[in-house]
């Protein structure tokens, strides 16, 4: 047949709206036209798909080819459409006699050799495909991600030839190994902290109540060490929380999903982080630090050194648990439910008083005024961390 339809998924935040790939082959001057609001990376698929088809032992049709990515008003980017476009081309040119294309969704980038490569956001695509009652075929590189959901309805492949043979009923595809979401993880232990009993008690209260905590004290008191050990006393992630966190992590770095999806996120951005890096952004907004810390901890060390507008941008997400990013081409909402832990010095020199504090009251006041009142109101607890008594570390050496 000269017309074929293949289903796939876009990646818009943690959502994966359905995309229909329509390919029509007709007589006329040889050429390929792609419509449906494709971005540059999608337009480049014509060259990748051509080489992948030829190097997989098939013929690229020397006819007029029209490819439509519907719906046309939805922006599309990335190489995730390579595999469905290639399969649709082969089906339209009658080189592939698929048994039931309607029952499958295809997601994957193609190498020039026809090998399949992983794509970001595979977890969301697999979840929505199974919810829609279809099976999904992804690259082997995404096997660990889709294995978090269910091995039922998910198939993995490493080459275009393998996918085509499976769709024709000539070859069986492997299913991803199911991942155990309840596996224990190793984190920093609070018992490693020597002294600072008041700080430990404050962390316990913070963990029990899900509070936001501000640690204030001079350098060397263990503020950062205490904050890094909070995740060790938090309850383990539920299956739903682990899947939510893994879906967000999959959008920015699929390679680390398998290693980190079991752990409560702990994000510690540098104080030079920009507003976009903190809350997310881009033409099609990508998640920022607050979304990557979803269901975990966002730790801000040297709090007054952050730009004031960056800190004030956290006020709404702290209250609502999500961040709305509106851009010209897309409006995306990311989850951002996290515990905010911050650490700061009491003065520019880092000390309250004594010979080490050489700041005037005006300098100290200007330093503290870098933080707005509404932002400080978001902290449920404020805890002073004093210097440990002399010799306490030697006693435990």
Image (tube, grey):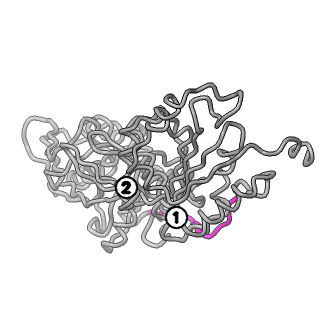
Give whichever of 39, 288 is nearer the camera: 288
The crowd level at tag 2 (other Cα within 10 Å; few <14, some 14-19, many 20+) is some
Regarding mark 2 in the picture, which secondary structure is present there? helix
Q: Residue 317 carries which label?
A: 2
Magenta highlight on residue 185? yes
**Point 30% across, 70% down: residue:** 103
- Mark 1 lies on a secondary structure that is helix
Above or below — where is 61 with respect to 240? above
> What stretch of residues is rendered in magenta?
171-187
Quick check: can you spot residue 175?
Answer: no
Give yes or no for residue 20 being in the magenta stretch.
no
Q: In which quarter of the image is residue 101?
A: bottom left
| Dot 1 and dot 2 residues touching (CB under 8 Å) | no
Question: Quarter holding the N terminus?
Answer: bottom left
- Would residue 275 be visible to someone looking at this image? yes
Q: Mark 1 points at which residue?
A: 242
Which of these two is toward me, 116 or 126?
126
Q: Where is residue 378 in the image (x, y as percent from the top left)?
A: 44, 56
Which quadrant would the C terminus be assigned to in this image?
A: top right
């Amino acid at each position: 047949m000269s017309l074929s339809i293949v289903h796939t998924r876009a990646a818009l935040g943690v959502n994966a709206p359905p995309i229909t790939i329509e390919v029509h082959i007709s007589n006329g001057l040889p050429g390929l036209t792609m419509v449906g609001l494709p971005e540059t990376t999608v337009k480049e698929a014509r060259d990748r798909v051509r080489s992948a088809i030829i190097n997989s032992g098939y013929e690229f049709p020397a006819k007029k080819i029209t490819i439509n990515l519907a719906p046309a008003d939805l922006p599309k980017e990335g190489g995730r459409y390579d595999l469905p476009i290639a399969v649709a081309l082969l089906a339209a040119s009658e080189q592939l006699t698929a048994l039931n294309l309607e029952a499958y969704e295809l997601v994957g980038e193609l190498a020039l050799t026809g090998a399949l490569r992983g794509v970001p956001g595979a977890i969301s695509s697999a979840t929505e495909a199974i919810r829609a009652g279809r099976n999904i075929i992804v690259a082997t590189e995404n096997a660990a991600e889709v294995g978090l959901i269910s091995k039922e309805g998910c198939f993995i492949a490493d080459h275009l030839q393998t996918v085509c043979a499976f769709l024709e009923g000539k070859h069986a595809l492997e299913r991803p190994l199911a991942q155990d979401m309840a596996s224990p993880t190793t984190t920093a232990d609070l018992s490693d902290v020597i002294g600072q009993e008041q700080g430990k008690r404050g962390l316990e209260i913070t963990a029990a109540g899900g509070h936001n905590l501000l640690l204030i004290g001079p350098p060397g008191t263990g503020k950062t060490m205490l904050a890094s050990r909070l995740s060790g006393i938090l309850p383990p992630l539920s299956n739903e929380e682990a899947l939510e966190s893994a879906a967000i992590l999959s959008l920015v770095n699929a390679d680390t999903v398998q290693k980190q999806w079991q752990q409560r996120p702990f994000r510690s951005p540098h104080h030079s982080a920009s507003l976009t890096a903190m809350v997310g952004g881009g033409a099609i907004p990508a998640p920022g630090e607050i979304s990557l810390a979803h269901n975990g901890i966002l730790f801000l060390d040297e709090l007054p050194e952050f730009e004031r507008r960056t800190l004030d941008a956290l006020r709404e997400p702290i209250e609502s648990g999500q961040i709305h990013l509106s851009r010209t081409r897309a409006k995306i909402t990311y989850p951002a439910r996290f515990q905010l832990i911050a650490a700061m010095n009491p003065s520019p020199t880092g000390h309250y008083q004594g010979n080490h504090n050489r700041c005037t009251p005006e300098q100290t006041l200007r330093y503290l005024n870098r933080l707005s009142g509404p932002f400080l109101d978001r902290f449920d607890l404020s805890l002073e961390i004093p210097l440990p008594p002399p010799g306490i570390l030697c006693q435990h050496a």
